[in-house]
Image (spheres, helix red, strand yellow):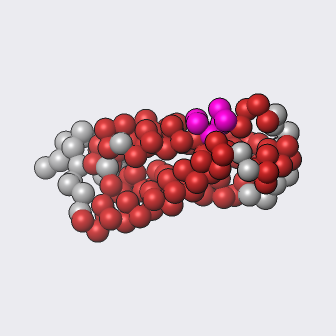
Amino acid sequence: MESATQSAPVSKKALWAGRILSAVPVLLLLFSGVLKVLKPAPVLQSLAHFGLPESLILKIGILEIACTFVYLIPRTAILGAILMTAYLGGATATNVRVGDPSSIMTVLLGVLVWVGLYLREERLRALVPLRS
């Protein structure tokens, strides 16, 4: 019998599905963060389109990479998911503010962060049981 703080161990299928689903936002955010750190012209133009000053690009890139790395570390993955959700929420708000249709993408990435983590992390399933 499972208690309120215990859940069934992660099956291999769920673990790999969670890893694959988690890889999508991780790879996209790492790629995006690295581009912000490298500052190529198209990225600078994109930030100008969103009304963000060029002086923020390095800080935003480092923040994006840092949140992603916190998510990648198993012990801090839940904190990383919270940080990535906050980052993606800000990105969504920025996209909506300028009428950019890519706001759907940032919302979907946030969903993938949590679904992937839920599938691979026993502690999260114990905290948020979907079955009674």
Would you identify the image quadrant in which residue 5 lies?
Answer: top left
Q: Nearer the viewer, residue 132 or 7?
A: 7
Residue 122 lies, in percent from the top left, at: 27, 48
Residue found 31% across the figure and 49% down from its top:
121
- Can you see residue 118? yes
Q: Is residue 56 left or right of residue 24?
A: right
Would you identify the image quadrant in which residue 52 lies?
Answer: top right
Would you identify the image quadrant in which residue 115 lies?
Answer: bottom left
Residue 50 lies, in percent from the top left, at: 83, 44
Q: Nearer the viewer, residue 36 or 66?
A: 36
Q: Nearer the viewer, residue 122 or 46?
A: 46
Residue 84 lies, in percent from the top left, at: 54, 42
Magenta-drawn stretch contains 59: yes
Residue found 43% across the figure and 38% down from its top:
70
Magenta-drawn stretch contains 90: no
Q: Is residue 36 left or right of residue 51?
A: left
Residue found 40% across the figure and 46% down from its top:
72
Overall secondary structure of the magenta stretch?
Answer: helix
- Can you see residue 131? no
Residue sticking out furthest to the bottom: 13
Q: Is residue 74 left or right of residue 57?
A: left
- Count of marks, rendered view: 0
Residue sticking out furthest to the left: 1
Residue stretch in magenta: 58-63
Residue found 82% across the figure and 34% down from its top:
53
Residue 73 lies, in percent from the top left, at: 36, 42
Q: Is residue 35 above or below residue 67?
A: below
